[in-house]
Image: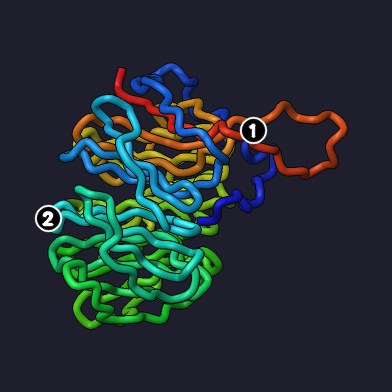
């Protein structure tokens, strides 16, 4: 994912048609609070560790750490130039960040927030994941079209895996022994064997387009995918790649999460909404559209509290004399995290 939302907006008629099928903002999720961070709205992923009540928010050249019990900033991880993603390894007491600015992964002590070491990756590491059964960190190198696999305990690079295109989010299904990687420029998913570190299959995600967000339910072996260029979420069979269901989302989705305990799926979108869908067997139905803030395209979920966290800046009013297609300008010192939870 990029710091500046570069997704092409879907046609207004298509967006209107899809949003017409969604419920109004009134629903099971409501605003809880806003956490002010300040500074420019340069960000990508967020991640939360429910066990330690820590929320990690990417912010340009640092990661801001927030106590989710008090909603207060309790620390910062420094020297993460162009940080995109954050992976958490509670069993190792470590946090890992993917830094596009120096093509490295930072290995960080979770207690002191100090950097233990940095590990070289491929070009432009984007999303990052920790897989606990093998204790491996997977860095998905966006324009590098590769995946770097790192031993979480030692920082040793154990594999560099070429993939078929531009990498976005990746997730694992350990019981299947597979890691799945969104390939944004080919509308597909590369499937990697966790033991051989080889790409063994490629799944097409149509009718989703330009896949960015992904979540995996390892119990049901289902993959949930949204893309930036079509207001659709697809549910896929992780073993076969078959699309078994689809549901409507807001346009410009950049992140996908599921809360399996309540059978819900979520897509956050740059247009200022989070779509909530109900999972029932192999079906997806619209439940609620949460109004957030323009540009709040990424999010994370705390499965213990069922709260959603998304980040965004505040924008200046639209200039009526601005050229068509001009980007909105975020106000300085306006970066914040928006929190939503069950009613």
Q: Nearer the viewer, residue 26 or 82?
A: 82
Q: Position of residue 44 (x, y in %)?
A: 47, 49
Along the horizontal axis of the image, is 182 left or right of 265? right
On-image quarter of the C terminus: top left
| Whether residue 188 is situated above or below residue 30 in the rendered picture | below
Instruction: Identify which residue is drawn at 69% across, 44% down.
Output: 11
Instruction: Identify which residue is drawn at 20% across, 52% down.
Output: 220
Q: Position of residue 227 (x, y in %)?
A: 50, 52
Along the horizontal axis of the image, is 154 left or right of 331? left
- In the picture as drawn, the residue positioned furthest to the right comes out as 321
Along the horizontal axis of the image, is 227 left or right of 14? left
Q: Nearer the viewer, residue 19 or 299?
A: 299
Q: Hey, which quadrant is residue 328 in on the image?
A: top right
Q: Which residue is mark 1?
A: 331
Quote the CA–CA distance across marks 2 and 1: 39 Å
Q: Marks 1 and 2: in contact by CB < 8 Å?
A: no
Along the horizontal axis of the image, is 321 left or right of 79? right
Instruction: Identify which residue is drawn at 24% across, 69% down.
Output: 178
Q: Which residue is mark 2?
A: 91
Is residue 184 visible in the rendered structure shown here?
yes
Is residue 250 visible in the rendered structure shown here?
no
């Amino acid at each position: 994912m990029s710091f500046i939302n570069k997704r092409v907006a879907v046609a207004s008629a298509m967006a209107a048609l899809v949003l017409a099928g969604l419920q109004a903002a009134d629903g099971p999720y409501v605003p809880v609070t806003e956490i002010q961070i300040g500074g420019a709205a340069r960000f990508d992923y967020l991640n939360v560790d429910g066990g330690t009540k820590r929320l990690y928010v990417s912010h340009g050249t640092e990661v801001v750490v927030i106590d989710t019990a008090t909603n207060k900033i309790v620390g910062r991880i420094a020297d993460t130039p162009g940080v995109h993603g954050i992976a958490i390894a509670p069993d190792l007491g470590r946090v890992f960040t993917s830094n596009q600015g120096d093509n490295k992964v930072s290995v960080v002590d979770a207690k002191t927030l100090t950097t233990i070491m940095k590990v070289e990756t491929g070009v432009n590491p984007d999303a990052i994941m920790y897989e606990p059964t093998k204790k491996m960190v997977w860095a998905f190198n966006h324009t590098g079209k590769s995946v770097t696999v790192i031993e979480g305990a030692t920082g040793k690079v154990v594999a560099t895996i070429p993939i078929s295109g531009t990498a976005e989010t990746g997730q694992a299904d350990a019981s299947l022994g597979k890691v799945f990687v969104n390939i944004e420029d080919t509308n597909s998913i590369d499937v990697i064997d966790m033991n051989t570190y080889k790409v063994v299959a490629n799944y097409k995600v149509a009718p989703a387009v330009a896949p960015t967000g992904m979540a995996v339910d390892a119990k049901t072996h289902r993959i949930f995918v949204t893309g930036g260029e079509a207001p659709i979420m697809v549910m896929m069979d992780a073993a076969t790649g078959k699309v078994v269901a689809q549901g409507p989302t807001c346009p410009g989705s950049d992140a996908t999460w599921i809360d399996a305990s309540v059978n819900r799926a979520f897509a956050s979108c740059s247009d200022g909404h989070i779509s909530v869908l109900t999972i029932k067997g192999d079906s997806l139905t619209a439940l609620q559209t949460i109004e957030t803030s323009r540009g709040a395209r990424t999010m994370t979920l705390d499965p213990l509290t069922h709260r959603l966290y998304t980040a965004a800046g505040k924008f200046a009013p639209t200039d009526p004399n601005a050229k068509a297609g001009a980007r909105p300008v975020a106000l300085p010192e306006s970066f914040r995290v928006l929190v939503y939870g069950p009613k």
